[in-house]
Image (cartoon, rainbow, N blue to C red):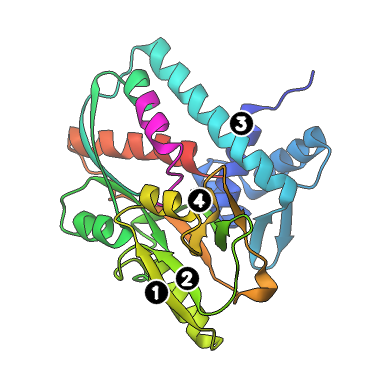
């Protein structure tokens, strides 16, 4: 039968998230040898190597990254099915903040799905710039937050309060056929945006001439401006519009760093609201991570 064992998938996700078998084994209430055996059997089932093991820990292979994406969805669905059959529902209100760079074409549909799956849970969602979402979370105005981090352009995170969801490259994008003659026209969000600063700094570092042609108030407006041919933009991969925009050739333009998306959450407490936030945070992590 072409299927996967759910417990093996749980161990696989735990190992990737923890970064090592030593750290993952206690989380799974297994000995390290038992965890290793589960992962060996999972790789046999997949007929591919899923993890690269080294002295520093474990990292997923390309095949492992693919399976990780599917595993998180399968585990989230399994948890949802269990809750439904046991009559366990999430109820109450959660204040959620999400950077508008996080899969802007899909996030609204995802929130609508959450509303259907958890009808007794009131989600109050705010979308905006990562720095603003991050600041609101630090002030205690949000229970959970999804923010983007770019090395050198965002604050250092606290490992006790955040979990990595996914990483992806930053890309130079523009309309097909757009001239890259200098000075380069840029389409950006306002100056406080980290991708605004990353793009300008990268071009200045390579002594390439540029000017700002258009400032958009949000990612959707930026996508439309780029598709219309107004100029070049710096976008993370999942924020790139599906139509009318292409990745521009890297040899012509300077390299850009990777972006990391993280879930900010606080440790569980004994209050019902705290437990609800932790439970929903786990669902959010399993759904968004890949």
Tell me which numbered mark, 1 or 3, is placed earlier along the sequence: 3
Mark 4 crowd level (few <14, some 14–19, many ≥20, 10 Å Cα): many
Q: Residue at x 29, y 56 (%)?
A: 217
Q: Which residue is mark 2?
A: 185
Q: For numbered disc 2, what is the local secondary structure?
A: strand
**x and y percent of residue 270 in the render?**
20, 39
Residue 227 has which mark? 4
Q: Quadrant of the N terminus?
A: top right
Q: Quadrant of the C terminus?
A: top right
Q: Which residue is mark 3?
A: 7
Tell me which numbered mark, 4 or 2, is placed earlier along the sequence: 2
Kindly report the distance in space between the C-alpha atoms of the residues bearing marks 3 and 4: 45 Å
Q: Residue at x 48, y 36 (%)?
A: 287
Tell me which numbered mark, 3 or 4, is placed earlier along the sequence: 3
Residue 197 has which mark? 1
As displayed, is residue 203 above or below residue 43?
A: below
As displayed, is residue 16 above or below residue 230?
A: above
């Amino acid at each position: 039968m072409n299927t996967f064992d759910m417990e093996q998938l749980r161990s696989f996700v735990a190992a990737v998230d923890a970064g090592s078998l030593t750290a993952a084994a206690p989380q799974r209430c297994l000995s390290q040898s038992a965890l290793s055996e589960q992962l060996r059997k999972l790789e046999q089932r997949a007929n591919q190597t899923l993890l690269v093991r080294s002295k520093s820990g474990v990292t997923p292979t390309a095949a492992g990254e693919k399976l990780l994406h599917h595993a998180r969805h399968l585990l989230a669905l399994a948890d949802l099915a269990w809750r439904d059959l046991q009559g366990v529902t999430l109820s109450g209100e959660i204040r959620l903040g999400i950077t508008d760079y996080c899969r802007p074409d899909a996030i609204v549909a995802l929130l609508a799905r959450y509303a259907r799956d958890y009808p007794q849970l009131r989600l109050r969602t705010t979308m905006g710039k990562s720095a603003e979402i991050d600041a609101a979370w630090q002030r205690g105005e949000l229970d959970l937050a999804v923010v983007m981090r770019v090395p050198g352009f965002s604050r250092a995170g606290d490992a006790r309060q955040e979990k990595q969801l996914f990483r992806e490259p930053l890309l130079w994008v523009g309309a097909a056929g757009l001239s890259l003659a200098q000075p380069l026209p840029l389409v950006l969000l306002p100056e406080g945006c980290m991708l605004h600063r990353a793009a300008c700094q990268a071009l200045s570092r390579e002594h390439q001439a540029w000017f700002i042609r258009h400032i958009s108030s949000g990612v959707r407006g930026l996508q439309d401006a780029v598709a219309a041919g107004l100029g070049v933009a710096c976008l993370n991969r999942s924020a790139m519009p599906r139509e009318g925009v292409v990745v521009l050739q890297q040899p012509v333009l300077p390299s850009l760093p990777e972006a990391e998306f993280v879930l900010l959450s606080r440790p569980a407490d004994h209050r019902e609201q705290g437990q609800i936030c932790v439970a929903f945070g786990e669902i959010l992590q399993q759904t968004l991570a890949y």
